[in-house]
Image (tube, coloured by chain):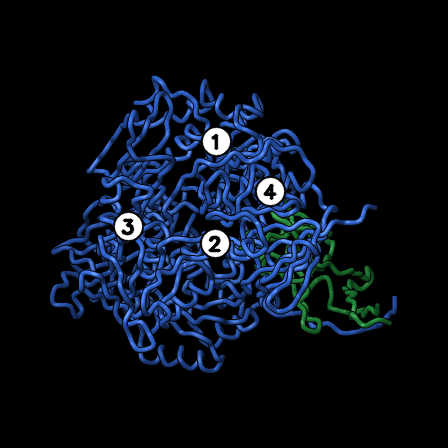
Amino acid sequence: METVKMLVGSVAEIDPKGSRLVRVNDMEIALFRLSDGEILAVENKCPHKGGVLSEGMVCGRMVHCPLHDWRIDLRSGAVQEPDTGCVATFPVEVDPEQGLVFLRVSTGVPS
Amino acid sequence: MKERQRLVMVGNGMAGLRMLEHLLKLAPERYEITIFGAEPHPNYNRIMLSSVLAGGADMNEIILNDLNWYEEHQITLHRGHTVNRIDTAGKKVVSDQGVEAAYDVLVFATGSNPFMLPLPGADKEGVIAFRSIQDCETMIEASKTYRKAAVIGGGLLGLEAARGLLNLGMEVSVVHIHPYLMERQLDETASRMLQRELEQQGMKFLFSKHSEAILGRGRAKTLAFTDGERLDADLVVMAVGIRPNVELAKHAGLQVNRGIVVNDYMETSVPGIYALGECAEHRGIAYGLVAPLYEQGAVLAKRLAGVNTEGYAGSVTSTKLKVSGVDVFSAGSFKEQDGSRVLRYQDELEGTYKKLVIQGDRLVGAVLFGDTSDGAELFSLMKKGESIQGREKELLLGVPADALSKGTGGGRLEAMPEDEIVCGCNGVSKGTIMQAIHEKGCTSVSQIKACTKASGSCGGCKPEVEGLLQIYAGEAAVSVKEGICSCTPMNRDEIVAEIKRMRLMTVKEVIHVLGWETEEGCTKCRPALNYYLGMLWPDEYVDEKESRITNERYHANIQKDGTYSVVPRIYGGVTSPSELKKIAEVAEQFEVPMVKFTGGQRLDLLGIKKENLPKIWEALDMPSGHAYGKTLRTVKTCVGNTFCRFGTQDAIGMGIRLEREFERLNAPAKVKLAVSGCPRNCAEATIKDFGIVAIDGGWELHVGGNGGVHVRATDLLCVVKTEDEVVEWASAFLQYYRENANWNERTSTWVERVGLDSIKQALESGEARAALQARIRAVLDKTTDPWKQIVNEPELRKNFEPLAGEEVGRTGL
């Protein structure tokens, strides 16, 4: 598989406990910044009813979907009990010198 | 690894899928599963169709297993395929589209078909059943064009269909062959009470009527009866019963009576072929309710997983009518028979009725109307078949709640088999609840709810869940106290007291110092703490937007498709030609999909993408109407003495003044005001949080009203003479509410909880009112318009824009 590395901006552009979204092809990816500064990326779509996770509340490592309060672990993408399912996650790299945020997305094209 | 066996299921409905979910838990690797379903949808909750019509749920919300679920469990689903041939010798099934599937194990879960009366004209357009999503869609479509609907059948299904059609704005007549409604579940007394209730809702009834033909050219127009009478109807819904869907099984050579005959292990007459759900007949009964089907599913799943099971022994069934505002419960055999004794209790004042049927020393049937809270308890007694000797009157007049955890009640729950379903809405068995207590360490009802969903829907089984907790968690359960959410055992008053005592200043501090069980709280406690801190430290606290709910963070209402709506403030519901022009121009410029009047005399621009919100606010250049927040929404007014010949005071002026006074106020929940210019009360002030009704020479002040979930009329707080006094009392009342209510508690519930007298007492003295008014004024003076702020501050505005990604490299893996 081929992966594309993308520069999506700087850490400062995402508020702590906040989120920004980036559109890649037809997909929305939500970038989250946790309280401890960690940046995580998941597909911006709750597996329940497609809620936009980027607009949910961030609590620790979890985001609560704004539509029906499903909890999703941003690191693993796993939906928390009692609900089930999972969200796609994407590798994030942060350049500590300049605070730039990079995202790796697979193109789905075999290399 | 062992070769997987091939399991084919014919039918993609609730009973079959429930069984599979169970089976996948017990033996996930055992079968390769293929499902054929005639409908184009994945498995959905048929019981909720009435809610779809009632507008309480949309089609997508009633899907139980979406397509991802099938994919996750590697299940092949052929949607829109009807299996029309089974080769039992060659062990394969064939669909109407020629798809074949070989099986080692075959499961019939074909459900049932609505029974359509074979009337002349029954094939006309506009004649339908009430069974599927498609039927619902037909009803919704018909309601847009046609006015008159007839439902044939005054049973459970017919009444739910009729209620749905009323919700769609149609005139509905229910035609029933019997002299009274729901005769299979109710005695005549309860049935007449039900009829009265439904007539008040607008239903019409024709009893002892036999339909003869449906007349009309192409489309239904008139329903004709055997007695020569006629009824105009452009839509005829047949809800006279269901028939097990057994044609395919018959052709395959299975033994079939009314349903497919099965034994206690859901085995049909042909080895390797099973049946369950509405298509199956067990000990002479084909069930049409969900609870028995779940019980059958649990037995079959165990059988197929090779787990020991005692088999299915049949079900005592209970019925609840899902029509809003009407509570009806019926279980067991409610008709008096030889040797049975009956206890009745009827209260015409409250509109409640209760009937118990006792055979020997056992309860065998019950009918409840108006108050169905004892239903679950009575139903359990019936299922257990234990002696109720000496407790008959207690059962009739209500069971003390704590009786559950003691004596016979506990005994009943202990004796309950583990695969018995406790929570019918979510199909949670006693065993699953025990597992949550023993293995996952649940020590409270809310933890059990979070872990298993038991008691999470209608809440009817909460007493039983509590009872099980008492038995299986023992001491641990007794000490558990329910806090404001599952992060803490502390309640609102304790938290507020601790914040004050230790001068805690941030949400993070509260969570750490007060020992929350989670690292950063949850969507219930964070917004609550943010509110309490702001209320307690108005001068020092900085509001945390990351702890506010989505709507309040984006200052707009999030809609089901992720778009937002914008409601600008229109003070007192009074606008001007230039303001209207501006709104119209903005709506055109941004191609707003819908412009709608709200219920609060304002305009709502709907369907707006998040990134356009700041642009629209900027173009409108109007203050936020706060239609999304726990704050002052709108002040509704009537015309008042400005134009109205009955108006006694200037209601419009008063309303505008109040809206300007309190706009942007942070409150525990949304706050609605209204001002009526005379006792005719055209602004409906008596269902608002604070309602003002003008009288000749004064103003009546009303509090604690609500027109929403729990409709409540206001209580009269007092009568004052001047506009200044109205503002003074409103300020004092609102500030007292801000300082004492729970977060997310409307004034209606708060007034009921603390009592009107305590509020009157707190506002009695002029000094107290002045102090409260000074405090609320200080808070209000600090607020700014959120829309303007976001428009002008790039740091806030950036969160509405997506980031632009830019490719910097590619790697092959």
Q: CA distance from mark 3 to mark 4?
A: 75 Å
Assign a secondary structure to mark 4. Answer: loop
Which of the numbered marks, if any, corresponds to residue B267?
A: 4
Q: CA distance from mark 3 to mark 2?
A: 65 Å
The residue tagged 3 is B728
Q: Which chain is indicated by disc 4?
A: B
The amino acid marked with disc number 3 is: Glu
The residue tagged 1 is B464
Which of the numbered marks, if any, corresponds to residue B112?
A: 2
Q: Which chain is indicated by disc 2?
A: B
Mark 1 is surrounded, within 10 Å at the Cα level, by few (under 14), some (14 to 19) or many (20 or more) other residues, namely: many
Closer to the eye: label 3 or 1: 1
Q: Earlier in the sequence, mark 3 or mark 2?
A: 2
Which of the numbered marks, if any, corresponds to residue B153?
A: none
Residue at the location (36% across, 20% down)? B361
Assign a secondary structure to mark 2. Answer: strand
Circles 3 and 1, Cβ within 8 Å, touching? The answer is no
Q: Quadrant of residue B586?
A: bottom left
Q: From the viewer's perspective, tell me whether residue A71 is left or right of residue B617.
A: right
Closer to the eye: label 4 or 1: 4
Q: Earlier in the sequence, mark 3 or mark 4?
A: 4
Q: In the depicted view, which residue is nearer to us: B796 or B482?
A: B482
Q: Earlier in the sequence, mark 4 or mark 1?
A: 4
Closer to the eye: label 3 or 2: 2
Q: Which chain is indicated by disc 3?
A: B
Name chain A's colour: green
- Report the chain shown in blue: B
